[in-house]
Each structure stands twice: as structure tokens, then as C-alpha cells.
Image (cartoon, rainbow, N blue to C red):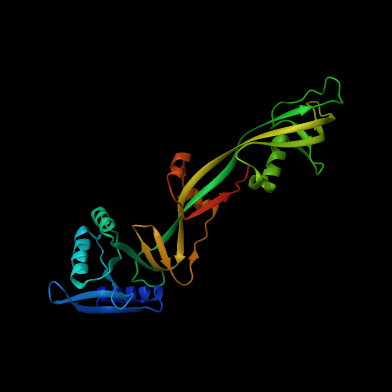
Amino acid sequence: MKSGEEYEKLSHEVVQALNRGKKVTHNVKIVGRLTEVNRQIDVKLDETDYDFVMYECKDWRKSIGVGVVGQLLTDLEDVGAKKGAIIANSPFTKGAVNLARKKGVDLLHLVKTADPKAKMGIAARVLAREKIIKSLQFGIRNTSLDGGPLLSTNPEDLIIVDDDNDEVTVKQYVKKRWNGGLNAKATVGENQITLNAVTIVDINGDKHTVTQLTIGLMVEQLYHEGPWIIEEAQGLYNSLKGTFHAYGNMKSATLSIEEMEKTFVELDQKMVDQSKYSIILDIASEYH
């Protein structure tokens, strides 16, 4: 069996699976209304007794050009099909895309990850939104001590006694709170942590209890875009609409922070607003 015929049969199988209850036929011959000769249709989908969709299947190594779309338009008129589509195992050229979009022809890629005859894969376009601490500062209100102790003004140096009675710096305390769940709850912009009657340690090592310690966090949101590979899927991907008509089970690859760091790129707010995404992930990143 020729590879082209194998691809046609695989396309027939997928089109049938996506259109259960409808008649889908492989390798149909219809006498053209204009040419009055037999015209061959790779896959024919009967939607009613009078209307049908014809699929032209191309198992090529090279890109599918404008000539293939033009030929399909001619064939559609000759056989009187309601609509036409091209199912391809390779990319479409810019000219093919432009003509197909203007003439209402669907440009499809067959995806069947378990079958080596289907060479096209699929990935979801993902936007990852990551909140980070851009800066932090603190302030002390003290009504119980005259003059007050001599303290460091650096969050990495000022020591406080936390809820576990551990002596930690302000930065270490924030890290513990942020990585313990505050990263998911914090809002973009100014955030505040308030500790009442907290014990602090001055530069001489002496402990004091102050009325209130306020820690201010400036939280910024970063945007990253990248692919999420689908390892198991079957269906038809519409390259013009960016949609995937699937059936059966789908399984995605594991998407780890390490993998995202390798494959995702950072975007600014303007680029995000101008784009559409299949999946949006909110990442609660750790503070180091």
C-alpha cells in the first residue's frame, strides 16, 4: 500500500471518529458537473442527503502551497461539495493560508500520536503568571520603650523572634511566610504583614518587645509564554483557527518549573494583552 493511501485511510478513520453517526467514505468517485468525468475524493463526509464535505489528504514532506488550495476550489465547484478541507502531514505556505482563509477552506493537520503515519504533534500555548517580591521594607511602632533600642534598618540584618520562638531576620521571616502560602494569596502591588507585640533583637544582642512591626512587600507580576506538549492525542488541528477537534483520551507531558525555565520566554504586559492562550497558569514562586 502506498504511503499516500495509508494516510488517506488514517484520515478517514479520524474524520469518522469525529463525526459519529454520519457517513464517512474513503476514496469516492463522483462525476463532475462541469467536467463530466470522474473526480476522486480522498475522504467524503455526508452531512445530509444533498450536502457533503470533501477532504483532500496530503502526505507530503514539503509544505502545502497555494496550488493545492486552488485545485481544491476547482474540485469543489465541479463536484458540488458544500465545503472542502485539506488534511496535511506538513506545514502550509503563507499563500495557501491566505487563499484558504478568504475562500473558506479549512487547513487541517491530522494528529494521532500513537500512529507513526501521523507526523504532526500538538502543544497548548501557555501563559504563566508569576508573582515575585520586588522589594521589602519594615517599620517599627514602639509605645513602651523610651528612646527605643538601637536597631539595624536592613531587613537582612534586623532579627526578630517568630511564632516558633526562632530568631530570624526580617527577610528570613518573609521568606518563611511567602513560601508557606502567602505567595498564592498576595496581590500584585503593595502588601503588608503586621506583627503586634513582637520581640526584636538590637545590635548589641539585647531583646526588646515593641508595640508593632510592619513589613511592606512590593509584589510584581511577571509573564512567561511557552508550549505544553501533548504526548497523547487524536483529532484534527485547524491551523487557521488555532483549534483542536479531539476525541478519546488526551495526556500532556509533565510541565515542571525547570522545564519552563528552559522553554518559556518572558513577555511584557502589552504583548500579553494582544495574545490568546489555551491555558493560563498562576505560579506561586518561592522567595530566595
Q: Vertical placement of 114 versus 259: above or below?
A: below
Q: Vertical placement of 264 versus 235: above or below?
A: above
Q: Vertical placement of 218 versus 229: above or below?
A: above
- Work out which quarter of the rendered image holds the C terminus and state it: top right
Q: Is residue 171 left or right of residue 95?
A: right
Q: Residue at x 41, y 63 (%)?
A: 244
Q: Is residue 268 visible?
A: no
Q: Residue furthest top?
A: 147
Image spot of residue 126 (x, y percent): 48, 53
Image spot of residue 146 (x, y percent): 86, 21
Number of numbered discs present?
Answer: 0
Q: Residue at x 37, y 78 (%)?
A: 22
Q: Is residue 278 left or right of residue 176?
A: left
- Work out which quarter of the rendered image holds the N terminus and state it: bottom left
Image spot of residue 287 (x, y percent): 63, 42
Residue in front for this viewpoint, 201 or 59? 59
- Location of residue 121 by image quarter: bottom left
Image spot of residue 112 (x, y percent): 39, 70
Q: Residue at x 68, y 48 (%)?
A: 181
Q: Is residue 227 visible?
A: yes
Residue in front for this viewpoint, 100 or 203? 100
Q: Residue at x 33, y 73 (%)?
A: 11
